[in-house]
Image (cartoon, grey):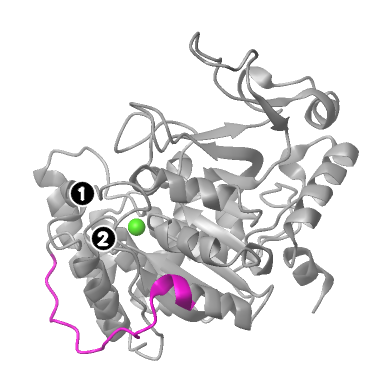
Amino acid sequence: MDSKQETFRITRRKFVASSAAVLATSGFAHRANAGGALAGQPSEQGKSDGKPDRGPSRGPFRVVIDTDPGVDDALALLLAMRSPELKIEAITPVAGNVPLDLTLPNALRMVEIAGRTDIPVAGGARAPLMRRLVTATYAHGENGLGGAVFPEPTTKPVTTPAAEMIRQIVRKYPGEVTLITIGPLTNIATALNSDPDLASMVRGLVMMGGSLSGGNITPAAEFNVYVDPEAARIVFQSGIPVTMVGLDVTRRTSLTDDHVRTLEAAQNPVSQAAAKIGRNAINHNRDRGFLVGPNMHDSLAVAGFLDPAILKWQDYYVDVETTGELTAGETLGYSPVAGDLRRRPGMEKEAAATNMPIRGSAPTLASTRTSPVLRDKFVPNTKVAVEVDSARFFDLLIGRLSGSK
Ligand SMILES: [Ca+2]
């Protein structure tokens, strides 16, 4: 194992310690390689230094893909299964965009289309940890695939439940497995809850989810976090180095007619299926009067893992609102280089290390608390994607799906 790989085999303790150490020495949190949740990331993520971009030529990386197909999940799964950099240990469907009774067969359909029935598919949670399931058929159609119809799968899921499957795989390969989560985080939180040592054995978690710039299902919340905010909070607070590919970047990835035509022109089962899903999704969006999209949210998380140069990153401490009447599922990003808390260059490291509080809401009059909640000092737990090279992303996505890359 080389030194870069070693960086990613990082425990919560090391993650926190190294983050603080880097902050204390570099002064620029967004240039620090404090967590490295993306297995393929270069040492200084998103750094624009004129060096040639590193193409998607690393790996293979052991991954588990947790998913709720889902139009963009379907394309993300096909992309992943066409990517030799990934050793997909399992696909673990969860309830989300549509109920598990649809996300599970939809995942099985994708492994059959890709000719990858060697990948175990393990059914997961039917409902969030503490809430009733809210689905997104308004965006994904009643069948979850934008109305694109495929035959019933003949492949069966494995009998092991998703959370247990995740636990077993991570324990089998400690420090090696990256969790790519493109649905609500119920399965992951269930696995973490079942095994207190598990988080320290996970190499990293790449999440499509969250937003620091407003939501899509409510003004505050992105859908995956909205569906199961308690699960998302468990993940962010787990100590696993998290990479968050949220709406800040994914809403800049609209699939177009040109993309679909390229897929249609390629004569292979994956491109034909992707084209069919994409065509239906575009038509569905138009029928509903959406001006943009469909956005390829989930594919961007996979693509950013394959080719880190697609995204640029900034370190944040991210937490999830779980009690808001209107805002449950909102992701909040604390950073000494963001918002009203920005500091002059040179002051950032001091501010971050000494006096930037992670502050909660003011206490109510009825509360027994006597002061604002000063919960902790700033230590980043998440790399948030803040910029996207959309053209480079679609080159990879359409290229892989059409078989030309
Ligand atoms: Ca999804």
The residue shown at (71%, 60%) is 42
Q: Is residue 56 magenta?
A: no
Q: Secondary structure at mark 1?
A: helix
Taking depth in this image into account, of 330 and 298 the one nearest to the observer is 330
Taking depth in this image into account, of 64 and 274 the one nearest to the observer is 64
Q: Which residues are magenta?
A: 148-165
Which amino acid type is shown beneath numbered disc 2?
A: Val
Which amino acid type is shown beneath numbered disc 1?
A: Ala
Q: Is residue 285 left or right of residue 63?
A: left
When the figure is inspected, residue 190 is found, relative to residue 323, above or below; the finding is below
Q: Would residue 85 be seen by someone viewing this image from the given angle?
A: no
Q: Residues within 10 Å of mark 1 (few under 14, many from 20)?
A: many
The residue shown at (12%, 81%) is 151
State the image coordinates of residue 276 (x, y, percent, origin top left).
18, 68
Q: Is residue 24 left or right of residue 80?
A: right
- Residue bearing mark 1: 139
Q: Are marks 2 and 1 in contact (CB under 8 Å)?
A: yes
Q: Could you give the CA–CA distance between mark 2 and mark 1, rounded to whole angstroms? A: 9 Å
**Res. 71 mark:** 2
Q: Quadrant of ligand 1?
A: bottom left
Q: Secondary structure at mark 2?
A: helix
The residue shown at (57%, 16%) is 368
Mark before the other along the chain sequence, 2 or 1: 2
